[in-house]
Image: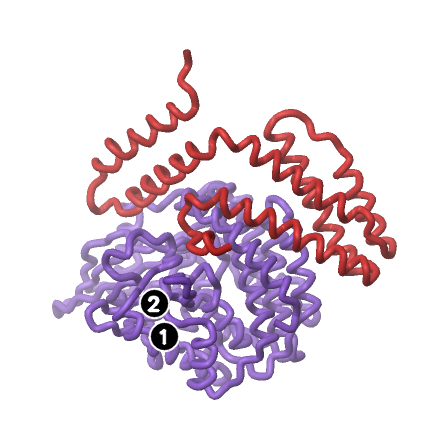
Chain colours: A purple, B red
Amino acid sequence: MALSLKTLAAEAPDRQSEPVMEPVCAALVARRAATRDLGPYTARAQAEVEDLLARFLTRERPRHTLGIVQRMGGGASKEQFLFELTSPGGSAETSVLRMDPRGAITETDRQREYEVLKLAEERLPAPRPVWLDADGSDFGQPALIMQFAPGVTKPQGAGIKVSGLGTHLGEPLRSKLKGQFLDHLVAIHALDWRSAELPSFAAPTACPTQAALWSVNYWKALWRLDRHEDRPIAALAEQWLLDNLPACDELVLTHGDYRTGNYLFDEASGRITALLDWELARIGDFHEDLAWVLMPVFGTIEDGVFRASDLFEREEFITAYEAASSRTVNRRTLHFYEVLSSWKCLIIVGANGLAAARARQNHQDVLLTFLSATTALFTDDLCRLLSQGTDA
Amino acid sequence: MSPDADERLASIVRALSDVVLPSLPAEAGLAKEQVQLCIGHLQILRAQLDHIHDYEAEELADAAALGRMLTCCAGGPATVSARARLREAVASEPGHGAAAIRAARQQINEAIGRLVEAVGIDGDDACRANLSRAILQMERQRSLKDRQWSAAFGFDAQLASA
């Protein structure tokens, strides 16, 4: 069984006083540190997953029949398997088993993902969560089972795009998708997290800068844990972030990884069928999601024009978000979160992914080392952003 | 007459492309993805192989140049201590071989990282400004070289305009 996040959360030193980061995040950092000693991890064999699913479903759906089990491709962080379950009445449902490898490019919690999917399922196109194995007691590693959502992450003929980076949608898809992309983001930020069942989430309400501080401290702790080598620009960015924490006027639920590549759409109609990868969701500042959308690495350049997620030009996106949400985008706060996003990406690919690969704890180490080639994009982004100063 | 590294890598790429990949069953999606990534990695390594030593030596030279620019940082005890450590790192002669060059670069970069932290604690204002300016200038140059170096991975659509 995997290390218990609940136990680690209870033991986290941050619980004694004002936490320096969200308590679950402190537990995630502790779990990551403790996992490093557990030795290598190999991709689950098909037969092993079939057996685990059969045992689990015999208990949970005793009269149902497990059909074909198939590994899913794509993605950089989880092992995912598609399976079909047929009821005694003959109706079949396809689901996705999403399991943590021992070490991954991001350290996240399946419990949180389950909770946020539960909140989203009736209000947004999102996969319906069905079962949760938070501590890995059934599947050996923490796991989530959710309903399969149809659709594609990129148009046919878009070529191989590792982790969906730089996906080119083009017209007419761009025009069909952009309004939905924006509306769904606004809808996420409108979710009523205060009255929702989100027991593993904590809200940074102690002071106006706590939302930003929690985020910086979480990624700082992951950097400290996983970096193989220091990098002057990373150190400078960390210092700048701590010196320039913005106040958050309105706490919202953020998605955390909102971009093209993390939603499914029907190619014929151009309708978004599911928003994916909610594992980095938190209660924080909406600027954090906007900055993530605007990351150069997730966009494209066509005829010299940059489009965030191949959908919006920069100012077009900001203006459209303001109009659709009735919020005002604070440019200084957006700048802070753009620095944070680039620094976060540097940590993800240049520290977390490589540390998982070095420890041989991921099922696709070769992908993680391949993705680390993006490190220079983020160090360069940080140079550009920090050169603009606070008043950008 | 042992085969050179490029010949060996080329033969591995060919075996993976022509023998291993086509023999994988359609349902072996993960294995196919990983073989394709292995081929990509190896092709890029082949293209970089003859230049790796020069690249790493230049990384060290850049780190040392930045380190030297920062050795006059002034401030309180934390800054003075971190500055001494950086001076030591910059002054030490790297040993021979790739591992020694990497270790020397890591030592300098770590010392710079600690200096940044220390200056954040008790560095004087002029020192903070100089440190920031020097790091941005040198890291910008370093990042552009690293982007060129990683261009073959295909992630950097904006390299031409950088």
Determine which of the numbered discs, if any, sits on residue B66 in the image.
Answer: none
Q: Residues within 10 Å of mark 2 (few under 14, many from 20)?
A: many
A264 or B7: nearer the eye? B7
| B134 in relation to A9, above or below | above
- Residue type at mark 1: give it: Phe
Quadrant containing the C terminus of chain A is bottom right
Residue B49 falls left or right of residue B81: left
Give percent across and percent down for residue B19.
Answer: 24, 31
- Quadrant for residue A80, please give it: bottom left
- Quadrant for residue B100, please give it: top right
- Residue type at mark 2: give it: Tyr
- Which residue appears at 20% of the width and 41% of the height? B25
- Quadrant for residue B53, please give it: top right
- Which residue appears at 70% of the width and 67% of the height? A243
A380 or B96: nearer the eye? A380
* Marks 2 and 1, the one that precedes in the sequence: 1
| A232 in relation to A191, above or below | above
Give percent across and percent down for residue A349.
Answer: 50, 52
For residue A309, say whether it is visible. yes
- Mark 2 or mark 1, which is nearer to you? 1
Determine which of the numbered discs, if any, sits on residue A181 in the image.
Answer: 1
For the residues beneath circles 2 and 1, the answer to whether they share a chain is yes
Residues at discs 2 and 1 in contact (Cβ within 8 Å) = yes
Number of callouts: 2
Label 1's element?
helix
Give percent across and percent down for residue A101.
Answer: 42, 51
Residue A39 falls left or right of residue A167: right
Where is mark 2, residue-wise? A263
- Which residue appears at 53% of the width and 75% of the height? A287
